[in-house]
Amino acid sequence: MIATRWVMVLFAGLAAAGLGCGSARDRAPIPDSTMTELLIELHLANGRIEVTDQPLPFPRDSILQAYGVDSSTYVDALAYYVQHPERYSRIYGDVIDRLSVERIPPGLETPLDTLGSEF
């Protein structure tokens, strides 16, 4: 899946960059709750792009702007979480939980219910 590869490449690159940094901050550049929301929005945007037949630009910067975060602060936050994997794991657990809830619309038992009774 493209999204999984994108996240893995991003995480690996930031891990390599983060390992070269000598000092770790005591505080994340972005609050954990905001980081959770950002990651959810970024994953949802990536999913929308993957199901579209037309190539679309990835709206990362506009999503970051909506949360008052610039690109360099976002990259700094990812580097911070590389140095604090327990926090990043907790955040990603929340992201996965929230995305799992949003996957199936309320009232539908399975995605196949959207096809109607003729099937």
Image (cartoon, rainbow, N blue to C red):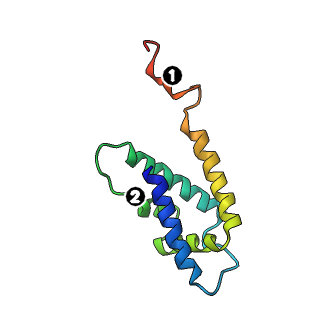
Q: Residue at x 43, y 12 (%)?
A: 118
Residue 57 placement (x, y as % from top left): 33, 57
Residue 48 placement (x, y as % from top left): 41, 46
Q: How many marks?
A: 2
Left or right of 89 in this view: 19: left
For residue 98, say whether it is visible.
Answer: yes
For residue 69, say whether it is visible.
Answer: no
Q: Are marks 1 and 2 in contact (CB under 8 Å)?
A: no
Marking on residue 21:
none
Left or right of 82 in this view: 54: left
Q: How crowded is the residue under tag 1: few (<14 C-alpha within 10 Å), some, or many (20+)? A: few
Residue 22 placement (x, y as % from top left): 62, 87
- The residue under label 1 is 113
- Secondary structure type for disc 2: loop
Q: Residue at x 65, y 74 (%)?
A: 83
Look at the picture and state if 42 lies above or below 27: above
Circle 2: residue type:
Pro
Tell me the quarter of the image containing the C terminus. Answer: top left
Circle 1: residue type:
Asp
Q: Residue furthest bottom?
A: 22
- Secondary structure type for disc 1: helix
Left or right of 63 in this view: 101: right
Q: Residue furthest top?
A: 118
- The residue under label 2 is 59
Q: Residue at x 67, y 60 (%)?
A: 89
